[in-house]
Amino acid sequence: MQKFTVHKGLVAPMDRENVDTDAIIPKQFLKSIRKTGFGVNLFDEWRYLDHGEPGQDPASRKPNPDFVLNQPRYAGASVLLARKNFGCGSSREHAPWALDQFGFRAILAPSFADIFFNNSFKNGLLPIVLPEATIAGLFDEVNAFPGYQLTVDLDRQVIVKPQGEEIPFDVAPFRRYCLLNGFDDIGLTLRHKDKIQAFEAQRLATKPWLAHTMVGA
């Protein structure tokens, strides 16, 4: 998993409440057994005027010129500004995969759905909860100033605005530790690889029959 320490990026405003995971990555794109290739279909039903199916060439489709992520001023945005209850709906892990693969590293919102919130941390995407008034102020600034960027400093737990003002935020210590070090669940386990191998070797030495697979069981 990619580490998250300090990230500076262009901000895109998603001015909708209750954005659910089916809007983030529609159900027809969940057929893939891979964890890659979902970014191209992020917000598919909003980004395009035609219906999308897996494997389509994006160049052959009709983009929606009114959708925020299709506007030139937000091209390359890596910080998403959202309204309350972002990521509600089904528990699909494909939602943070799609956001990450599109290029987003952090999402700022007044609240998130619990499962989406947890899945984001496990996949290197940083969801930050801020007071609703703070989010509203950021929407005003993003809309007023093209090219608006924020610096997200996870180590110090602050967001730095263009003029230098800092907005503090909280992240649970364990989640912060994992993101700073790039540890997903597998990475956390592999820290103890030597101990696991030693345990397995000792177990097989004392109980060698465990090494044999039972046939016809």
Image: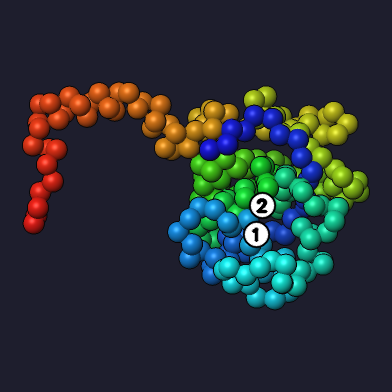
Q: Quadrant of residue 160?
A: top right
Compared with 199, 81 (above or below) is: below
Secondary element at image label 1: helix
Number of callouts: 2
- Helix or strand or loop: what does disc 2 sit on? helix
In whole angstroms, how far apart are the C-alphas of marks 1 and 2? 7 Å
- Mark 2 residue type: Phe
Q: Residue at x 76, y 48 (%)?
A: 77
Residue 201 place in picture, x, y as percent: 20, 26
Residue 116 shows in this picture: yes
Q: Position of residue 157 (x, y in %)?
A: 67, 28
Residue 7 lies, in percent from the top left, at 71, 34
The residue type indicated by label 1 comes to Val
Q: Residue at x 57, y 40 (%)?
A: 124
CA neighbours of label 1 inside 10 A, class few (<14), some (14 to 19), many (20+):
some
Give the crowd class for mark 2: few <14, some 14-19, many >=20 residues within 10 Å.
some
Q: Are marks 1 and 2 in contact (CB under 8 Å)?
A: yes
Q: How is the image coloured?
A: rainbow
Residue 108 against residue 47 in the figure, above or below: above
Relative depth, front residue between 66 and 166: 66
Relative placement, left or right, of 172 versus 141 is: left
Q: Is residue 57 left or right of residue 180?
A: right
Name the residue beneath numbered marker 1.
40
Residue at x-position 81% and y-position 49%:
139
Viewer-proximal residue among 59 and 145: 59
* Residue that label 2 marks: 102
Answer above or below: position of 104 versus 46: above
